[in-house]
Amino acid sequence: MGPLVPDIIGNELNLVVALLIGIAFGFILEQAGFSTSKKLVGLFYGYDFTVLRVFFTAGITAMIGVIAFGHFGLLDLNLIFVNPTYIGSAVVGGLIMGLGFILGGFCPGTSVCAAATGKIDAMIFIAGSFLGVFIFAEGYIYLEDFYKSGFWGYPHMFETLGMSQSAFAVVMTVFAVLAFIVTTMIEKKVNKISDPNYYSPKRYLGIALATIFISFTAFLMPERQSDILSRASDKNVLNTFHPEKMTVDEFAFRIIDGDRKLNIVDLRSKEDFTQMSLPNSVNMNYENLFGKDAAKTFSKKNASYVIIANTEDEETKAAYIAREIGYENVYVLSDGMNGFRDNVINFKAPQNIGTRHESDLYKFREKASILIPEIIKENKNKGVQENKESKRALGGC
């Protein structure tokens, strides 16, 4: 359900929507002829390439859609589950899958669709699938070493090929269009179709050019997180960015006053955060700012958010990211936590005090240097609020 769950569609309604989508998906499969084994195995015999075109179209549509959702911040690409690659078992499993597809005329999804229409061969195919699953599960203890051999991690194709996500989208789309054209020509020759309307060069050329043109929009939609992080690391960009600042004295006063509208986003290491955590603070890193947990943190009404790190430069980078994401009322702590320690927590009044303002300021800092360590100690005893990493959603077929 992509970006819709749980922000727009609740977990309970999600099951209902998933059921409706599943019914619609099965209906489309059946109408496309995927419940007929002859149409499915036509791919291997060269007389019907509907399966190839449908799966290629689905893949290209999903690819452009994911890029668009990621660019506009509707989908956290870090949470998309990527199946681990074990090359040995993947090759053997692919061969078994392909052989079963040819002999049985179905894949797991289409067999269920066909069985729902009453096809007995599909029901037998499903029974065989369950038998295969049972044999594998019972024999896993003997197959585990081979199953986990050749681990390649969790690769993305564009990273493996050493190209950008946008470039891979265009290459994949061009490859798909060429595959459509070539397979249509093969179908025409194998089935001896003489109807000129079946393969109209002008019509296919127009569709091909339109499809390739749409794929080029991927270059206009760079992966949002990588794009923002790249700009946030550019010193020239940060030199033109001037976030609102909160002085160490105002920051100290609001902590002592127990201001509940003050929300602290702490970018320091987990060790530093654990040793000295401030009330109403959450520990994050730059990548966490793009997650759903950060969105909840920055969504409170009438609240102000102070980003703290050891240095003000680190805070400025995070504030730039927060602004690009769309968060408001974000401040950085002047001089960072290093300055806060020197001027407040470890404050020592100078011997020579000039103006009345300086006298009042130094009195406040002396008081704060006593109270804030006590507040930090009390907050530590309550337990610190660390940012919880969002988990990847498991899925796939």
Image (tube, rainbow, N blue to C red):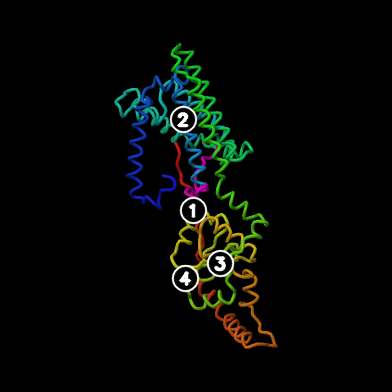
- Cβ–Cβ under 8 Å for marks 3 and 4: no
Instruction: In the displayed orientation, state which residue is furthest to the right.
Output: 352
- Cβ–Cβ under 8 Å for marks 2 and 3: no
- The circle on residue 331 is 3
Front-most of residues 261 and 160: 261
Please name the residue shown 50% across and 50% down the image: 73
Of labels 3 and 1, the one closer to you: 3
Please, what secondary structure does the residue beneath circle 3 have?
Answer: strand
Which residue is disc 2 drawn over? Answer: 55
Percent x, y of residue 336: 62, 68
Percent x, y of residue 39: 40, 21
Please, what secondary structure does the residue beneath circle 1 have?
Answer: loop
Please name the residue shown 51% across and 60% down the image: 327
Q: Earlier in the sequence, mark 4 or mark 1?
A: 4
Percent x, y of residue 160: 61, 37
Name the amino acid type tagged 4: Lys
Secondary structure predominantly adopted by residues drawn in magenta:
loop
Q: Is residue 272 above or below residue 145?
A: below
Which residue is disc 1 drawn over? Answer: 390
- Cβ–Cβ under 8 Å for marks 3 and 1: no
Name the amino acid type tagged 1: Ser
Which residue is disc 4 drawn over? Answer: 261
Name the amino acid type tagged 2: Phe
**The magenta segment:** 71-85
Residue 196 magenta-drawn? no
Q: CA distance from mark 2 to mark 3?
A: 48 Å
